[in-house]
Image (cartoon, helix red, strand yellow):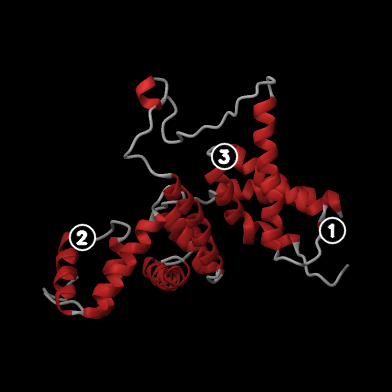
Amino acid sequence: MSGHEINPNKWIDLYSDYLFNYTITRVKDRETAQDLVQETFFAGLKSMKNFKGEASERTWLISILKRKIIDYYRKINSKKGKAEVRMNLNFDAEDDGDWLEQRVADPFDKTAENNLENTELGLAIHNCIGKLPSKQAEVFKMKTLLDYDTETICNELGITASNLWVIIHRARTSLASCMEKNWF
Amino acid sequence: MSKGFKLFMSCKEAVNTCDKAQYGEVTLLDKIKHTIHLFYCKTCQKYSANNKKLTELVNKPEVDCLKKSEKEQLQYNFKKELENHQ
């Protein structure tokens, strides 16, 4: 079926951040998340012929990724033949939760809904970033999400500081209106 | 720098200051001037509020993306796999 345009060369640029964000909110471990994203791309490559073009490429990749994440949890849970579900729910501190007091529900903790909302937030933002021109998207990601110094970015991309601020401004304006439409 | 002291900034400057403020890269003087500007400029008030909201969203820990090195690694592995595939 050659009628459905599918172009794996662009996958990494277009979808890797989106898929990574999807994974990181579910597995909480950077390296695992990275591996899962990579496996997803590989699997996508393998089953490219089965892609019917009914959904967008990204939706299709996400559906593969979902299976990968489920498989991952199955694997770690079955390692010692234990029936318990081992999921790391407290992701901000590794040594938390050993004391009984810490296992009691914390009323000031984020609610499940809150967490769900934030899980979707990352995707919404990456969705909006994906609509930006690639240069703006790149600069915005480096500056905002990766916290690079202005100087580092300027050196790496060969632009001036005022140039950078113009790009950032444009990116922020379109992002704000995109999020206004899709999020608030 | 040698423009002399101006208490009022233009909207263009205000917007620029606001953007920089989202990354904590503003001098105190500019901050004060920006606050003064916001007193009388409705448009910039709105921009500033929206900008702050965006920053709050983006700074949540759930918003993450691949580091440059991680992405390059991914790209590299993927290219190899792609070559095998064809």
Q: Secondary structure at mark 2?
A: loop
Q: Point out the frontmost of discs 1 and 2.
A: 1
Q: Quadrant of the N terminus of chain A?
A: bottom right
Residue A111 vs residue B41: left or right? right
Q: Chain of mark 3?
A: A
Residue corresponding to mark 1:
A50
Tally the numbered discs.
3
Residue corresponding to mark 3:
A27
Q: Amino acid at mark 3?
A: Val
Please report the residue visible at 45 percent of the width from the left and 65 percent of the height from the top.
Answer: A183
Percent position of residue A25, x then y:
52, 45
How far is the residue under mark 1 from the one under mark 2?
A: 57 Å
**Residue A10 visible in the displayed image:** no
Residue A183 vs residue B74: left or right? left
Q: Tell me if residue B8 comes above or below residue B82 in the rendering.
A: below
Q: Residues within 10 Å of mark 2 (few under 14, many from 20)?
A: few
Q: Tell me if residue A85 comes above or below residue A22 in the rendering.
A: above
Please report the residue visible at 60 percent of the width from the left and 50 percent of the height from the top.
Answer: B71
Percent position of residue B22, x then y:
31, 60
Percent position of residue A8, x then y:
75, 60
Residue corresponding to mark 2:
B27
